[in-house]
């Protein structure tokens, strides 16, 4: 048994990004880096500190932290690097099993007042504001998963800093035709062609990694780069440089942004957090929402705050 011990503080939040107070007992489990379960206990409350965890001073200190609660999906994070000198903090989000998107404040008027940049992207190319509003409201009412995915991706893109601005600054107009309308796992857009050079440069600086043979998973793609800042929910920017268009004097190509779950496929096996939801299905924007929020909290960045939340069905 190791002589030294460590502590991990677990803070639990709900889909509104607020402390989870309505689940009385959560099962907290800790696995060390050797995949030995060293702690498992039902504990109530949204803020829990687990003490006396073994400290090995090696890879065994890379803990997996998992939480489950009544009528909630399981959530987890890996790795949490335990240390005897400080209490590590991990923030987890538990979603209710029966839930829905809450777009309060993200209706047409809300988006118009709160995020002019998103509004400009959503409305570019429409013949009139009325046409743009009708299309947005159809997305809101009939394709909520696609709208949530759009918000997830755009919010994450805002946190990416290139040499000159960020990726979202280069996006000019959504693509809606030829089966390329926003979907629950990605969208297509016309973007300033200079974005390719900006992302290529970010790749040399270690912010992105190039994906080879991108057309294997992205039909017609010429290049693709994935953000590598987090272990989970990184933005991937795939370019279709053979598709060209001039918009208001700007040479544009098509960019296809999406967000995958895990950078490291082993993380999923360690966490066992998402169960059957990952088996051969399209990327679920609810899971992206949870993973990106937790990854950002762990990295000490500004909170991931797309203009919607996830709430329990009444």
Image (tube, rainbow, N blue to C red):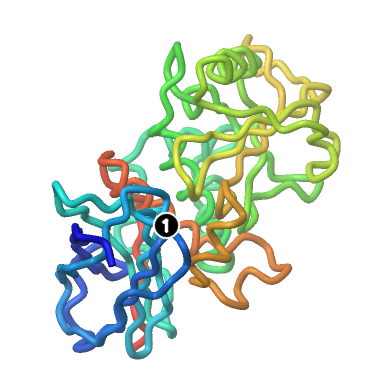
Between 98 and 135, the one nearer to me in the picture: 98
- The image shows residue 113, relative to residue 167, as above or below, that is below
Between 188 and 294, the one nearer to me in the picture: 294
Say left or right for 88 vs 307: left
Mark 1, residues whose alpha carbon is within 10 Å: few (<14), some, or many (≥20)? many
What residue is at 57 percent from the left and 15 percent from the top? 204
Q: Is residue 25 visible?
A: yes
Question: Which image quadrant is residue 65 in?
Answer: bottom left
Callout count: 1
Say left or right for 77 vs 139: left
Say left or right for 8 vs 134: left
- The percent position of residue 78, horizontal first and vertical second, equals 42, 57
- The image shows residue 158, relative to residue 294, as above or below, that is above
- The percent position of residue 98, horizontal first and vertical second, equals 43, 85
Q: Is residue 110 visible?
A: no
Label 1: element kind = strand
- The percent position of residue 314, horizontal first and vertical second, equals 33, 89
Between 168 and 117, the one nearer to me in the picture: 168
- The percent position of residue 239, horizontal first and vertical second, equals 71, 28
Q: Quadrant of the N terminus?
A: bottom left
| Label 1 sits on residue | 78
What residue is at 33 percent from the left and 66 percent from the top? 93
Question: Which image quadrant is residue 32 in?
Answer: bottom left
What residue is at 71 percent from the left and 23 percent from the top? 253
- The image shows residue 170, relative to residue 269, as above or below, that is above
């Amino acid at each position: 048994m190791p002589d030294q011990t460590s502590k991990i503080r677990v803070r639990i939040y709900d889909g509104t990004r607020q402390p989870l107070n309505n689940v009385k007992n959560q099962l907290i489990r800790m696995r060390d880096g050797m995949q030995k379960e060293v702690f498992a206990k039902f504990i109530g409350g949204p803020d829990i500190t687990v003490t006396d965890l073994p400290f090995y001073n090696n890879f065994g200190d890379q803990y997996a932290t998992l939480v489950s609660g009544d009528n909630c999906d399981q959530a987890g994070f890996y790795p949490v690097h335990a240390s005897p000198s400080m209490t590590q903090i991990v923030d987890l989000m538990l979603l209710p099993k029966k839930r829905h998107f809450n777009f309060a404040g993200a209706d047409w008027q809300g988006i118009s007042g709160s995020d002019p940049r998103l509004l400009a992207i959503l409305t570019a190319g429409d013949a009139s504001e009325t046409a743009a509003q009708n299309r947005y409201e159809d997305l809101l009412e009939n394709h909520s998963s696609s709208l949530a995915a759009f918000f997830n991706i755009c919010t994450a893109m805002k946190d990416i800093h290139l040499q000159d601005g960020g990726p979202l600054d280069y996006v000019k107009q959504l693509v809606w035709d030829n089966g390329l309308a926003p979907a629950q796992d990605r969208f297509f857009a016309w973007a300033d062609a200079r974005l390719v050079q900006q992302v290529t440069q970010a790749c040399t600086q270690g912010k992105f990694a190039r994906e080879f043979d991108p057309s294997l998973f992205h039909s017609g793609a010429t290049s693709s780069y994935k953000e590598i800042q987090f272990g989970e929910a990184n933005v991937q920017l795939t370019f279709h440089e053979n598709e060209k268009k001039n918009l208001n004097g700007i040479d544009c190509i098509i960019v296809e942004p999406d967000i995958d779950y895990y950078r490291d496929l082993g993380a999923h096996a360690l966490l066992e957090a998402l169960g059957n939801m990952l088996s051969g299905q399209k990327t679920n924007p609810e899971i992206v929402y949870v993973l990106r929020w937790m990854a950002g909290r762990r990295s000490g960045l500004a909170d991931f705050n797309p203009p919607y939340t996830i709430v329990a069905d009444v």
